[in-house]
Image (cartoon, coloured by chain):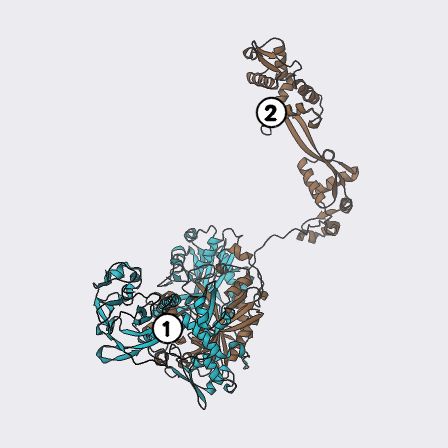
């Protein structure tokens, strides 16, 4: 601790330390009197010194004293309290209140309350002829005078602890916590300490003696060379910094960039497409029959009437139509239904990232080739903790003369370990309209446990043949939302796109930990 | 994906299982998932939308039996039909197709009846398009006199429907009964409705809605059933009937076919015994699965998948799909069954050996470069959804260009596609009054714009704003980005309803007008509930390409 304590002194600290160094120790009152500090400055200086171990408290005690309030001061000036005056009047034979109240020593209310107090304490009683003296000693009231008024009148201090119990009770009942100025008595509680200088304080005082200290280092101080004659005030370096706000990438964007980087590193080229798609590219080209349940009006967002997406060439359209209707040249028999060209041209918001892959197949891709896309997709879902109106899908394809099922599984295994940091994984048969065989990848994530990470398969011939692709094509898609939430320490998917800047500023930024099962939560 | 819940006491013996220990793993071969295991029932999710045969207890049980014991025979020795149904030509445009059979020799029990009802619900809901393309009816065989007549009748024809106390007209059934209301749309607009009667004229049912209470109520103990499927799609109707026949046969019933006499002399015998035949060359199989076919016993593998007839040729295999399946439309489908039978876990994953070079899309590389400069300028990146509301873009922000609307929005909150990113930044500003200022914000994202000939186009935009900032500050940010990228920036005064008159401008980069920059109008700030001055700019990211 001592190494880190600053030995630079505030002027108030310095004043107090100097006094302590001269006197060794002293009480609060003595120190205040000796240094000429007001109580506020003294308490601050003491608090600082105590926190830096430059002074210490030898002892402290609580004292409770009685002083006169405004009313009590008036009684002291009169030389008697209403109670004692009333006892004297009764003793002298004045027995009726109206008569008493004619006496102008005290006002009517003061006489009234004095009578009440005396009756209650049993000093007076009500007799057949009016008030009579019941306790000739006068009860507690003479003791109140002698114990409090007299002592204070002589300039002494009345400690509550030195009074008889009955006097304490009477005094306390006349010293209300509120409205003290109008009370008869005021009770003060004070803590007073005896303090002394500590070794660190002596050290600091010696260090500071005779030298000027520099606070903020300014250009002027540098230019004048003034710093050569002074010492630097030592800063308290262990206080927390004030918060500043800096420019930064959105954590979710960093996550997506991590995925992008990872896939590039595996040799994939990025595909880009359109937010709006024709049903042709979104569905037909993927051999999803026009009667497929996932093509229901409640599964995609349709664009306003009249808005179109550029149509595919008629030649390509005819090939896809044949694949659907009778298999065309694909070697299969197709879905055996009447394909509607009008339906193909309807514009929808892209509902699956695979639309990107379909477009890539149709635009003369590299063979061998690997492609990926991070595509905004739109699903007809209620927005809640696990659904956004639009979300990113990560999709891709691999084309190659010698590509087969085992490569598909090898790639999925690579995703499981490289992207999810999975410790275990398994492949499960699955169904997708555009792939056959189809596989689901289930991974055991270090934190999330088993979950379905993605789907994949070999594109059907009915998808590839119309596009003029003769080689096998692996298609895969990964669901990364749960991993993104985990990596970013969130539990509600809506927080990925939160409009509250204060919340955004609380999100961590550790992009190097986002993939591979990292847990930033 | 359909889910079925079936009693374990019925399912386990049917599937030849002692217990449910390996059920989860076994179900994988059927593309099915164990959705829930309860004390007396099991819930299974079926993921293959082209295999309605699996959406029943019998179908799943059969799959598991064959996986263990090999292929079974199905509807092997049907006799010639002894009874027939006459179909009237009036049904041509309403509900033209029917398939039927009888099942005898099996006494209906509680579980069997429940399973029939599950099949009826699941198959007709998904595969049968909510009973439009296929609806199922079951009747006690006893008391039905053949031939049965499938014809049309007036909407005022009346009978006592199943579950009702009194006779109702067909119109009343559609208006008043729960089932009627649910399926009324299928018959909307027709003057006459389908009806099924027996020879005596007794009404059996009002397809696709309700059976008769008198002739169409099956109860445990019945020992003969008449089953029919009606609908608008030939294959859906026939396949549904074949699936039901296989299911009842699995329970021990003897299936007898029914002849369907369509108008103009066309005749079909149902259930149709489908024999979809798939041939795959050994070369293609080896190439596709990555294992030399010589190392495989295809007959054993395909038998596990219930292929009963397999013919090994010189260089190819030909296999006949079981009659309850019509999803084999390409040799690839046969190969998938081989892969499943081998087991995906037994394939041996390998990596592609051919070298390819990875790369990010050019627009993403550009985005990263520009974003890095903005972060350097102290800007914080914002991400918001692309779907948004008309109110945010037009009413609140006063964007001059109208966004493209969604014609079937789920809520108005996500009723349009963003055509500008500035509203998203203003929304953040209006939600972040409590966050320390200044707010230097930017967002890079795709938007959808209108183009000529009513086409739409996706564009990657950049928008930047400063909350508690002014024209000069936002101009400086754009200025330093252009300077560092070596682009020539100028502003050309341009009033825009979003901004204070005289404090907005067209952004001109290398001579072309590309975007807008300005100090937002206090009226815009007020409607958004923003209490600090905001300045911003937006432009297409590509305009910053050098």
Q: Position of residue A155 (x, y in %)?
A: 71, 23
Q: Colour of chain A?
A: brown
In the rendered structure, find residue B417 and report the number of the disc placed on it.
Answer: none
Q: Nearer the viewer, mark 1 or mark 2?
A: 1
Which quadrant of the structure image shows residue B231?
bottom left
Q: Residue A453 versus residue A156: which sits nearer the camera?
A: A453
What element does badge 1 sit on? helix
Q: Which residue is mark 2?
A: A183
Does residue A398 appear anywhere in the picture? no
Q: Chain of mark 1?
A: B
Q: Position of residue B40 (x, y in %)?
A: 46, 63
Which quadrant does the C terminus of chain A fall into?
Answer: bottom right
Q: Residue B111 versus residue B121: which sits nearer the camera?
A: B111
Local crowd at mark 1 within 10 Å, few (<14), some, or many (≥20)? many
Q: Residue B304 versus residue A452: which sits nearer the camera?
A: B304
Which quadrant of the structure image shows residue B136?
bottom left
- Looking at this view, name the residue that lies furthest to the bottom: B314
What element does badge 2 sit on? loop
Q: Residue B190 versus residue B85: which sits nearer the camera?
A: B85
Left/right of residue B414 with respect to residue A121 in the rendered view: left
Report how far apart the C-alphas of labels 1 and 2 lie in the structure.
102 Å
Local crowd at mark 2 within 10 Å, few (<14), some, or many (≥20)? some
Which quadrant of the structure image shows residue A297?
bottom left
Q: Colour of chain B?
A: cyan
- Relative to A272, residue A399 above or below: below
Q: Position of residue B535 (x, y in %)?
A: 47, 56
Q: Are marks 1 and 2 on the same chain?
A: no
Left/right of residue B197 with respect to residue A357 in the rendered view: left
In the rendered structure, find residue B248 and report the number of the disc placed on it.
Answer: 1
Q: Position of residue A312 (x, y in %)?
A: 37, 76
- Relative to A13, residue B169 above or below: below
Does residue B9 appear anywhere in the picture? yes
């Amino acid at each position: 601790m001592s190494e880190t304590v600053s030995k630079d002194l505030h002027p108030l600290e310095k004043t107090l330390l100097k006094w302590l160094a001269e006197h060794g120790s002293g009480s609060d009152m003595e120190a205040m009197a000796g240094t000429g500090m007001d109580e506020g400055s003294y308490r601050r200086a003491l608090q600082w010194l105590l926190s830096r171990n430059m002074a210490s408290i030898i002892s402290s005690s609580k004292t409770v004293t009685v002083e006169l309030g405004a009313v009590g001061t008036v009684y002291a000036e009169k030389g008697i309290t209403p109670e004692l005056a009333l006892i004297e009047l009764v003793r002298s034979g004045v027995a009726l209140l109206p008569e008493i109240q004619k006496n102008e020593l005290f006002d009517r209310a003061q006489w009234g309350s004095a009578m009440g107090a005396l009756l209650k304490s049993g000093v007076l009683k009500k007799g057949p002829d009016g008030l009579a003296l019941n306790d000739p000693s006068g009860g507690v009231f003479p003791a109140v005078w002698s114990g409090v008024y007299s002592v204070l009148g002589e300039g002494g201090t009345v400690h509550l602890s030195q009074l008889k119990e009955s006097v304490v009770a009477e005094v306390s009942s006349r010293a209300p916590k509120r409205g003290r100025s109008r009370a008869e008595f005021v009770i003060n509680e004070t803590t007073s300490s005896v303090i002394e200088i500590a070794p660190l304080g002596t050290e600091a005082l010696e260090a500071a003696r005779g030298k000027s200290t520099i606070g903020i280092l300014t250009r002027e101080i540098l230019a004048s060379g003034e710093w050569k004659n002074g010492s630097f005030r030592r800063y308290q370096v262990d206080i927390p910094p004030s918060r500043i706000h800096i420019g930064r990438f959105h954590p979710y964007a960093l996550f997506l960039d991590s995925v992008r980087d990872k896939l590039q590193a595996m040799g994939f080229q990025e595909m880009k497409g359109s937010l709006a798609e024709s049903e042709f590219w979104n569905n037909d080209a993927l051999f999803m029959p026009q009667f497929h349940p996932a093509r229901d009006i409640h599964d995609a967002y349709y664009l306003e009437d009249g808005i179109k997406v550029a149509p595919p060439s008629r030649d390509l359209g005819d090939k896809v139509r044949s694949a659907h209707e009778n298999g065309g040249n694909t070697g299969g028999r197709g879905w055996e239904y009447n394909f509607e060209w009008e339906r193909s041209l309807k514009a929808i918001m892209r509902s699956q990232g695979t639309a990107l892959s379909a477009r890539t197949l149709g635009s003369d891709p590299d063979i061998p080739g690997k492609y990926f896309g991070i595509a905004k997709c739109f699903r007809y879902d209620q927005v809640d903790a696990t659904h956004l109106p639009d979300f990113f899908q990560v999709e891709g394809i691999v084309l190659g003369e010698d590509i087969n099922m085992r490569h598909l599984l090898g790639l999925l295994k690579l995703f499981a370990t490289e992207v999810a940091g999975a410790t275990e994984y398994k492949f499960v048969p699955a169904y997708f309209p555009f792939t056959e065989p189809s596989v689901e990848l289930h991974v055991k994530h270090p934190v999330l446990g088993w979950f379905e990470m993605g789907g994949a398969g070999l594109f059907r011939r009915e998808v590839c043949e119309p596009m003029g692709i003769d080689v096998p094509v692996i298609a895969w898609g990964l669901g990364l939302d749960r991993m993104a939430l985990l990596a970013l320490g969130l539990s509600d998917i809506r927080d990925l796109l939160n409009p509250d800047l204060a919340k955004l500023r609380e999100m961590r930024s550790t992009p190097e930990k986002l993939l591979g099962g990292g847990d930033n939560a | 994906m359909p889910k079925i819940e079936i009693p374990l006491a019925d399912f386990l013996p049917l599937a030849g299982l002692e217990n449910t220990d390996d059920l989860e793993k076994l179900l994988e071969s059927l593309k099915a998932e164990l959705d829930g295991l309860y004390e007396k029932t099991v819930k299974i999710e079926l993921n293959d939308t082209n295999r309605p045969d699996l959406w029943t207890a019998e179908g799943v049980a059969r799959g598991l039996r064959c996986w263990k014991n090999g292929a079974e025979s199905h509807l092997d020795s049907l006799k010639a039909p002894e009874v027939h149904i006459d179909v009237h030509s009036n049904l041509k445009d309403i509900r033209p197709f029917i398939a039927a059979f009888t099942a005898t020799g099996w006494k209906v029990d509680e579980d069997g009846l429940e399973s029939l009802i599950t099949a009826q619900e699941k198959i007709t809901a998904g595969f049968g398009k909510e009973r439009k393309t296929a609806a199922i009816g079951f009747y006690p065989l006893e008391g039905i006199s053949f031939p049965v007549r499938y014809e049309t009748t007036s909407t005022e024809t009346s009978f006592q429907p199943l579950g009702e106390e009194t006779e109702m007209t067909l119109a009343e059934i559609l208006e008043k009964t729960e089932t009627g209301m649910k399926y009324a749309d299928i018959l909307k607009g027709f003057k006459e409705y389908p009806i099924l009667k027996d020879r005596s004229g007794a009404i059996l049912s009002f397809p696709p809605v309700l059976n008769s209470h008198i002739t169409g109520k099956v109860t445990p103990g019945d020992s003969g059933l008449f089953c029919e499927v009606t609908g608008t799609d030939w294959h859906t109707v026939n396949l549904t009937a074949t699936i039901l026949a296989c299911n009842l046969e699995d329970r021990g019933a003897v299936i007898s076919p029914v002849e369907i006499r369509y108008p103009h002399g066309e005749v079909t015998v149902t259930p149709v015994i489908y024999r979809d035949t798939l041939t795959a060359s050994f070369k293609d199989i080896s190439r596709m699965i990555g294992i030399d076919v010589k190392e495989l016993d295809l007959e054993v593998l395909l038998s596990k998948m219930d292929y009963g007839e397999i013919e090994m040729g010189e260089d190819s295999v030909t296999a006949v799909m079981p009659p309850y399946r019509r999803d084999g439309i390409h040799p690839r489908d046969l190969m998938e069954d081989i892969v499943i039978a081998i087991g995906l876990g037994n394939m041996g994953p390998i990596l592609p050996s051919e070298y390819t070079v990875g790369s990010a899309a050019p627009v993403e590389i550009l985005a990263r470069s520009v974003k890095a400069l903005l972060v350097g300028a102290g800007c914080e990146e914002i991400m918001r959804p692309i779907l948004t509301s008309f109110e945010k873009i037009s009413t609140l922000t006063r964007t001059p260009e109208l966004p493209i609307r969604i014609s079937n929005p789920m809520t108005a909150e996500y009723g349009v596609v963003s055509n500008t990113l500035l509203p998203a930044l203003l929304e953040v500003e209006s939600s972040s009054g409590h966050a320390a200022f200044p707010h230097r914000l930017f967002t890079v994202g795709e938007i959808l714009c209108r183009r000529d000939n009513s086409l739409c186009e996706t564009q990657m935009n950049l928008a930047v704003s400063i909350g508690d900032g002014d024209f000069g500050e936002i101009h400086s940010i754009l200025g330093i980005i252009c300077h560092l990228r070596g682009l020539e920036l100028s502003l050309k005064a341009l009033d825009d309803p979003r901004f204070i008159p005289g404090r907005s401008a067209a952004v001109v980069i290398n001579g072309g007008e590309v975007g807008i920059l300005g100090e937002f109008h206090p009226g815009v700030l007020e409607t958004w509930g923003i209490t600090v001055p905001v300045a911003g700019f937006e432009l297409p990211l590509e305009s910053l390409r050098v």
